[in-house]
Image: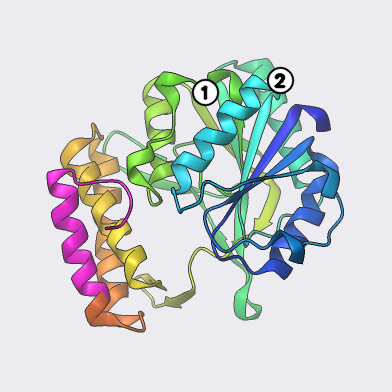
Amino acid sequence: MTRDILAIIICFKPNHERLRGLIDAISGSVGRIVLFDNGGLDVAKLACTGAEKIQVESPGENVGLATALNFACEYGAKNGYRFLISFDQDSTPPAEMIPILERELLAYQAKNARAIAIGPQLVDVRDGKEMISPFVRFGKIGISKWSGDGTEPVSQLITSGCMVDLSVWGTENRFNDELFIDYVDNNWCWRMTRKKYLVLGTSRARMPHELSEEIKESSYISLNKYGWIRRYFQMRNGVYHLAHESLSLAQRLYVLRAMIVVFLSSVISDERPLQSVWQCMRGAAHGLVGRMGAYR
């Protein structure tokens, strides 16, 4: 039910028109909306419905994705919310998405109480094309992708559109603040599945979502476009996981492939390739020695 769900939108230099549309889309399906201001939020520009549900949290600096999620989880648990649903500032969920996610998660929990999170099928609809992002499943050594009909266990979810049962959040199940941004969602899902919890993907809810600034596709690989600071985090946190986290072989192969895509994308897709490549190298060195936290 609406009063059971807390939403958080994590903001960093947001497009206020798109943010207003996101708030309008979800306000009827949640009890409260936390706008977590990591920088650049101007509340005066948000003349939107559901204003009475909005709570703004401003730490005064960019504290990252994981810290924002941990704040929301703690706030939700203390104030009696059953679920937390999180969004990036540029997500565009349909109005019916949140009730569908709640219904599907509750239905699965009736069969298996170890189910603790659910996410929608993501669709990138830029340039008049519809590109579905399949869910990932890890085997002992292999990686498979699933985008079939229904609701099934998967191996990881992205933060935006992810609904979490707050009964499992606590000291041992926090998001890793030191990662700051990239791999925050993967890391949490991987840790929870190691503890025999289930995270679910469902095709019964679909959400348009842009996974990068731009995508370049070929027959063999999809390259993305980001700024050079983001490349630092992508490479640093990938190397950190390989060097310091307990991963399966399949997860290690997944991270290695992601790092290859990051490097190739830096060279081919980014506006400042030399700067991006330098930040990839710098991030890799920091990840190897465990120098984590915010960008310095």
Q: Is residue 143 above or below residue 282?
A: above
Query: On the rendered image, what quadrant is the C terminus found in?
Result: bottom left
Find residue 189 and report its image quarter.
top left
| Earlier sequence position, callout 1 versus callout 2 | 2
Residue under label 1, please give it: 169
Disc 1 residue type (three-letter) = Trp
Q: Dot 2: within a 10 Å radius of its alpha carbon, few (fewer than 14), some, or many (20 or more) residues?
A: few
Nearer to me, 69 or 198: 69
Instruction: Name which residue lies at 32% across and 58% down.
Output: 234
- Evaluate whether residue 166 shows in this view: yes
Instruction: Name which residue lies at 57% across and 25% down.
Output: 116
* Of marks 1 and 2, the one in the foreground: 2
Nearer to me, 222 or 63: 63
Dominant SS of magenta comes to helix
Q: Is residue 237 magenta?
A: no
Residue under label 2, please give it: 80
Residue positioned most to the front: 60
Q: Is residue 295 above or below residue 117?
A: below
Q: Locate residue 168, reporting x and y percent.
A: 53, 20
Q: Secondary structure at mark 2?
A: loop
31 horizontally vs 275: left or right? right
Q: Locate residue 157, reporting x and y percent.
A: 50, 43
Q: Locate residue 146, reporting x and y percent.
A: 51, 47
68 horizontally vs 53: left or right? left
- Evaluate whether residue 196 shows in this view: no
Q: Which region shows up in magenta? A: 276-296
